Image (tube, grey):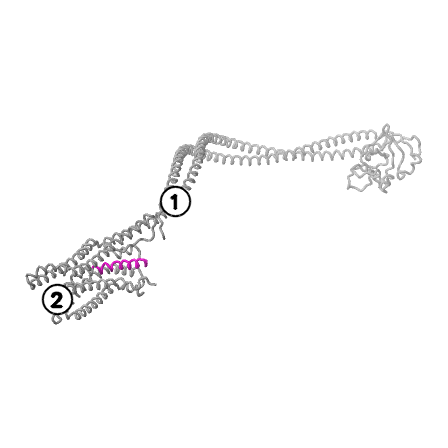
């Protein structure tokens, strides 16, 4: 169900009741003061009724015109958007003042209207009409204040309903800016009205009562005047008491309503303050009020809203701080552990670096030794190169000698072969001589004693041939041996030539290798010199590195101490965060 | 016949060497002596009679007969000729004429050149 339905009518309805109360009070006053002439009371009642109805209709129409958005929301013609709710809120907040001024204006106009219209009745003078207008004008402020105060409470109730529709505190503050500080003026006005209306009416009543008494005494005999004077107070006391009492009732009602209008917001704010003091924070407590009270209520609502927001943020921050602090503690512990490990590692690294520096120094020393050795190797290589060159030349000479020997042996072999052929020739001759001698000996033997001498000569020739043949065989054997020896010598010399060729090739390769070795040795010497220089620089660098590692180690040890302090601080921060959460948890912030 | 005469003598011998063996021929039975090489003039080789392979040697020639021996020497001195025992008559193709001893302790068969050449040619052993 729409909570704003009918609120536009309900909020302004007390102004009608207040007007009717005022009309009743005015009629009562007029009746006691005999303002209505006999015979015109019906006309007066008609005039009064018409004017009251018209004035109420017009006043109500005017008031409803000032509650257009609230009315539309109540009928569902408009959607409860932020703008519409803000407009309705403004209308509800302004309706008490609207009612006051409208009531005052219509009372003034109606009073004049009744007085004028009554004056023009037959037999009625302007004096009677003026008196009636005067009564209306005198009661107009009081009735307006009564209407204002009676509408005020309902307007606040309507505002509460509108706010309950979802008007944010910021929108509320924007819709109802707390810049109208009129409480003092308003209280002065109410007090003035409350004092002025009874005072005017009493003065008028007393004056009228005195005039009537004076007129009566003037018409009365002097003897009866004391008795008339003695009775006068009791005659005029009753209307005075009734009218004053009625007026005071209205004034007291106004005061009661005024007190309520001042006290209710203060009580609500006090209750909200006490609730906040108990730590119960819900939605922002918005207390509809006016003037400075509204300023206080708006400031209180803003304060509560800000407090809720701050508490939520504080709660979130506390949780985050707690979790972050826990992470910080964990991280600090890890960092502390890591820093300890790092310190240990750095200690080892520093020791290693110092060892490295010593090694670098040793390397530099070794590099210097290597440089000297490389130089010695270069000298040796150059010496070896010269020796290899000499060896190569010697090998070449040996090769030439071997070649000459081979040539000589070949020539010798040829000569031996020639000798062999000669020996074969001689052997052939000796063989034939032997054969001839043999045949000659045979013939001499066959000749008997005659051929004996011939046989002896032939035998001797045969032995000679055989001796030659034996010698030739020996020579052949020797030739064969010589041939074998020369062949062996040829083969040996050829092998020697080949060996010397191989040796010369090897010597050349050795020479070339030694050339390359010399080049390499030169390069090695240069490289070793560069290495020596680099190792000296490395030694200097490692010395600096060792010093730097010592500094880093000291810094890391300092960082480890700082980390431990940070861990302790994080622990303190965690404890503070816990206390903060505990403190914040005392406030119950409903979502 | 010479073989039939006991304790006869013979002058002029051709003492031939065939391997480790020696045979002798009467100098009168040898016409000439020549050198012989394997592959040369075809002639029976005395080594065949001893089951030995052919080898260079001296070629003995007489008429249409020839024989190759390893070596030879001529003994002009007078030598005792021992007769052929009856049981050896006809041996060596009938070429055996007796035995001579050209040196002390040595007994060499004396053969007829033509008969021994024929015997070797026929392949006797």
Q: Which chain carries label 1?
A: A
Mark 2 element type = helix
Task: Give the answer, above or below, for where A219 lies relative to A460.
Answer: below
Q: Which quarter of the figure has residue A227?
A: bottom left
Query: For mark 2, what is the residue?
Result: A128
First along the sequence among labels 1 and 2: 2
Q: Residue furthest bottom?
A: A122
Does A74 sit left or right of A140 as displayed? right
Query: For mark 1, what is the residue?
Result: A322
Q: Which quarter of the figure has residue A396?
A: top right
Q: Which quarter of the figure has residue A358?
A: top left
Q: Is the magenta stretch mostly helix, strand or loop?
A: helix
Report the quarter where the C terminus of chain B lies: top right
Image spot of residue B59 (x, y percent): 81, 38
Image spot of residue A488 (x, y percent): 65, 34
Judge whether residue A158 is colored magenta.
Answer: yes
- Judging depth in this view, the residue of A166 and B14 nearest the camera is A166
For the residue carrying disc 2, how many other residues have a C-alpha within 10 Å: few (<14), some (14-19), or many (20+)? some
Given this view, does label 1 or label 2 mark the residue nearer the observer? 2
Q: Which residue is drawn at 34% across and 52% down?
A: A282
The residue range painted magenta reads A145-166
Does A436 sit left or right of A384 as displayed? right
Q: Residue at x 77, y 39 (%)?
A: B37
For the residue carrying disc 1, how many other residues have a C-alpha within 10 Å: few (<14), some (14-19), or many (20+)? many
- Residue A159 can be seen, yes or no: yes
Image spot of residue A217 (x, y percent): 8, 62
- Judging depth in this view, the residue of A367 and B22 nearest the camera is A367
Could you confirm whether marks 1 and 2 are on the same chain?
yes
Report the quarter where the N terminus of chain B lies: top right
Mark 1 element type = helix
- Judging depth in this view, the residue of A494 and A246 nearest the camera is A246
Q: Residue furthest top?
A: B104
């Amino acid at each position: 169900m729409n909570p704003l339905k009918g609120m536009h009518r309900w909020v302004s309805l007390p102004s009608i009741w207040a007007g009717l109360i005022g009309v009743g009070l005015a009629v009562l006053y007029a009746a006691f003061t005999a303002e209505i002439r006999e015979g015109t009371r019906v006309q007066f009642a008609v005039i009064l009724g018409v004017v009251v109805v018209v004035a109420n209709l017009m006043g109500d129409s005017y008031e409803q015109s000032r509650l257009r958005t609230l009315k539309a929301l109540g009928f569902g013609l408009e959607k409860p958007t932020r703008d519409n709710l803000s407009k309705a809120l403004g209308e509800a907040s302004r309706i008490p003042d609207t009612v006051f001024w409208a009531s005052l204006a219509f009372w003034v106009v109606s009073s004049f209207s009744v007085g004028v219209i009554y004056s023009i009745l037959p037999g009625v003078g302007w004096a009677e009409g003026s008196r009636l207008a005067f009564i209306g004008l005198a009661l107009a402020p009081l009735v307006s204040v009564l209407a204002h105060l009676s509408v005020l409470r309902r307007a606040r109730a309507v505002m509460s309903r509108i706010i309950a529709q979802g008007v944010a505190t910021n929108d509320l503050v924007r819709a109802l800016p707390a810049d109208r500080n009129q409480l003092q003026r308003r209280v002065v006005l109410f007090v003035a009205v409350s004092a002025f209306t009874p005072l005017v009416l009493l003065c008028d009543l007393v004056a009228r009562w005195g005039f009537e008494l004076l007129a009566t005494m003037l018409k009365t005999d002097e003897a009866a005047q004391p008795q008339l004077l003695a009775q006068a107070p009791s005659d005029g006391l009753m209307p005075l008491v009734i009218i004053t009492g009625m007026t005071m009732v209205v004034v007291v009602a106004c005061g009661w309503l005024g007190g309520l209008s001042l006290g209710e917001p203060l009580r609500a704010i006090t209750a909200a303050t006490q609730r906040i003091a108990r730590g119960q924070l819900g939605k922002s407590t918005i207390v509809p009020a006016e003037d400075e009270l509204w300023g206080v209520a708006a400031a209180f609502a803003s304060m509560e809203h800000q407090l809720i927001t701050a508490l939520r943020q504080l709660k979130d921050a506390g949780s985050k701080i707690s979790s972050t602090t826990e992470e910080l503690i964990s991280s600090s512990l890890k960092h502390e552990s890591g820093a300890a490990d790092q310190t240990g590692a750095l200690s080892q690294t520093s020791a290693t670096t110092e060892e490295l520096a010593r090694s670098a120094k040793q390397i530099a020393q070794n590099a210097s030794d290597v440089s000297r050795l490389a130089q010695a190797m270069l000298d040796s290589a150059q010496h070896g190169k010269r020796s290899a060159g000499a060896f190569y030349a010697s090998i070449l000479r040996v090769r030439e000698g071997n070649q000459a020997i081979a040539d000589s042996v070949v020539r010798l072999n040829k000569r031996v072969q020639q000798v062999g052929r000669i020996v074969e020739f001689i052997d052939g001759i000796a063989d034939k001589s032997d054969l001839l001698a043999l045949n000659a000996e045979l013939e001499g033997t066959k000749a008997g004693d005659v051929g004996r001498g011939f046989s002896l000569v032939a035998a001797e020739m045969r032995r000679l041939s055989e001796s030659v043949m034996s010698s030739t065989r020996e020579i052949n054997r020797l030739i064969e041996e010589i041939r074998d020896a020369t062949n062996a010598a040829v083969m040996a010399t050829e092998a020697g030539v080949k060996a010397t060729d191989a040796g010369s090739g090897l010597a050349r390769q050795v020479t070339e290798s030694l050339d390359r070795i010399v080049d390499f040795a030169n390069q090695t010497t240069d490289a070793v010199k560069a290495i020596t220089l680099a190792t000296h620089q490395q030694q200097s660098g490692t010395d600096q590195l060792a010093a730097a590692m010592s500094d880093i180690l000291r810094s890391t040890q300092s960082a480890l101490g700082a980390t431990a302090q940070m861990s302790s601080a994080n622990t303190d921060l965690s404890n503070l965060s816990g206390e903060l959460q505990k403190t914040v948890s005392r406030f119950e912030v409903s979502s | 016949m010479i073989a039939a005469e006991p304790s006869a003598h013979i002058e002029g011998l051709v003492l031939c060497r065939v391997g480790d063996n020696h045979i002798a021929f009467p100098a009168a039975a040898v016409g000439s002596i020549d050198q012989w090489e394997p592959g040369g003039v075809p002639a029976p080789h005395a080594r065949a009679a001893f089951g030995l392979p052919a080898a260079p040697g001296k070629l003995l020639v007489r008429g249409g007969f020839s024989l190759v021996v390893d070596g030879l020497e001529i003994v002009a001195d007078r030598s005792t000729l021992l007769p052929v025992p009856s049981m050896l008559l006809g041996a060596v193709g009938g070429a055996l004429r007796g035995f001579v001893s050209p040196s002390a302790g040595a007994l060499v068969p004396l053969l007829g050149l033509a008969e021994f050449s024929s015997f070797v040619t026929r392949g006797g052993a």
